[in-house]
């Protein structure tokens, strides 16, 4: 498959290390593009729920693919989220074209983009972190049950369904939270005179213009979605932002063969399991 050239790719909420992560699909996507810049906008590795017993080869392949971009000199920004907040103590670390940061201000064709994960707007995260972590475990369990259900539905020729989307649709508070999240991000971005504000966190891909409720002005709000349910990314090319939506039929000809690069033997040099376990044990 020929690689698509893209100026900027933004992905978030991959949750590597959890059962709900669609690592194989993400790997296919990353292999299909040739970005000039890759932005990982938080919750890429789920250190909250990391277990030594669950780190499939597909998850390691995603790490290798990202590091392959680094070895090619492509700028890769890893912005920390709440599930990988343990990395925040290492903010401003850089290695070659790789940079670990908490937030990023980027000049995009003369317009300023304010990029960060977005958990700072989550009241649960700020005041009841234990509840947020409990909810994360429940969400991952729901996703795992959903995968078994969809396997059965597919086997009998029925359409797949999303438990979490149905749950969210049942509760008006979930919709209200998303709207408040987006409006808060937009109000702050307008106040800071940014043209774009780019977030993750809420697993809801979006591109829309939002008027500020605080002062005169508007901003383009963007959210990259996730790779647990929606399988989406943001792409910037030809001076235009779009949402990429993964569709299996677009990758039928794709093979699982990896390019022969120095990145392929990185697991021999980088023990991801041990590193993540150490992050979990060290005090924040």
Image (spheres, rainbow, N blue to C red):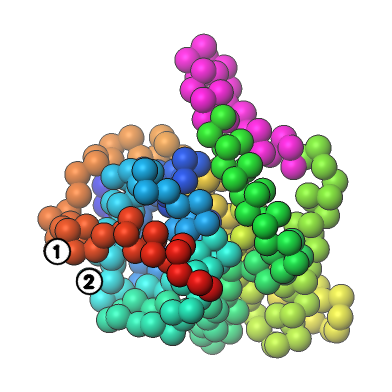
* Residue position for label 2: 71
Residue 269 position by quadrant: bottom left
- Estimate the x, y position of residue 146 in percent, counting from the top left: 57, 30
- Estimate the x, y position of residue 11 in percent, counting from the top left: 48, 60
Residue sitting at 53 percent across and 73 percent down? 284
Q: How far apart are labels 1 and 2 at the CA level? A: 8 Å
Mark 1 vs 2: CB contact within 8 A: yes
Q: Is residue 159 magenta?
A: yes
What is the crowding at mark 1: few (fewer than 14 residues within 10 Å), some, or many (at least 20)?
Answer: few
Q: Secondary structure at mark 2?
A: helix
Instruction: Please name whichever residue, 227 or 2, is drawn nearer the observer in this view of the structure.
Output: 227
Residue sitting at 54 percent across and 83 percent down? 105
Tell me: 242 left or right of 179.
left
Main SS class of the magenta portion in the image: helix
Question: Is 160 located above or below residue 184 in the figure?
Answer: above
Residue sitting at 34 percent across and 76 percent down? 98
- Estimate the x, y position of residue 133 in percent, counting from the top left: 63, 54
Residue sitting at 39 percent across and 79 percent down? 99
Q: Secondary structure at mark 1?
A: helix
Tell me: 215 left or right of 20.
right
Instruction: Please name whichever residue, 220 or 99, is drawn nearer the observer in this view of the structure.
Output: 99
Magenta residues (range): 146-168
What is the crowding at mark 2: few (fewer than 14 residues within 10 Å), some, or many (at least 20)?
Answer: some
> Is residue 235 in view from this perspective?
no
> Is residue 258 in view from this perspective?
yes
Q: Return the mark for residue 262.
A: 1
Q: Which comes before the other along the chain, label 1 or label 2? A: 2
Question: Is 238 located above or below residue 253 in the figure?
Answer: below
């Amino acid at each position: 498959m020929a690689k698509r050239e893209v100026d900027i790719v933004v992905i978030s909420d991959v949750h590597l290390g959890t059962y709900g992560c669609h690592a194989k699909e993400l790997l296919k996507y990353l292999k299909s593009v040739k970005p000039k810049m890759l932005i990982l906008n938080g919750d890429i590795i789920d250190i909250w729920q990391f277990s030594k017993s669950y780190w499939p080869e597909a998850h390691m392949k995603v790490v290798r693919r990202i590091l392959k971009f680094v070895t090619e000199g492509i700028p890769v920004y890893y912005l920390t989220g709440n599930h990988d907040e343990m990395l925040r103590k290492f903010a401003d670390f850089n290695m070659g074209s790789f940079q670990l940061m908490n937030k990023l201000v980027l000049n995009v064709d003369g317009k300023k983009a304010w990029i960060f994960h977005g958990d700072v707007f989550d009241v649960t995260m700020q005041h009841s972190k234990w509840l947020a972590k409990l909810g994360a475990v429940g969400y991952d369990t729901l996703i795992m049950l959903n995968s078994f259900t969809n396997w059965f539905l597919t086997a009998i020729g029925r359409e797949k369904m999303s438990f979490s989307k149905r749950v969210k649709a049942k509760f008006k508070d979930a919709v209200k939270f998303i709207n408040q999240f987006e409006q808060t991000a937009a109000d702050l971005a307008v106040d800071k005179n940014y043209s774009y504000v780019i977030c993750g966190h809420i697993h809801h891909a979006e591109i829309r213009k939002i008027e500020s409720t605080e002062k005169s002005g508007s901003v383009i709000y963007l959210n990259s979605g996730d790779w647990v349910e929606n399988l989406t990314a943001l792409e910037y090319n030809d001076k235009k932002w779009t949402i990429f939506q993964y569709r299996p039929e677009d990758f039928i000809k794709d093979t699982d063969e990896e390019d022969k690069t120095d990145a392929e033997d990185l697991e021999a040099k980088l023990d991801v399991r041990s590193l993540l376990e150490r992050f979990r044990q060290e005090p924040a």
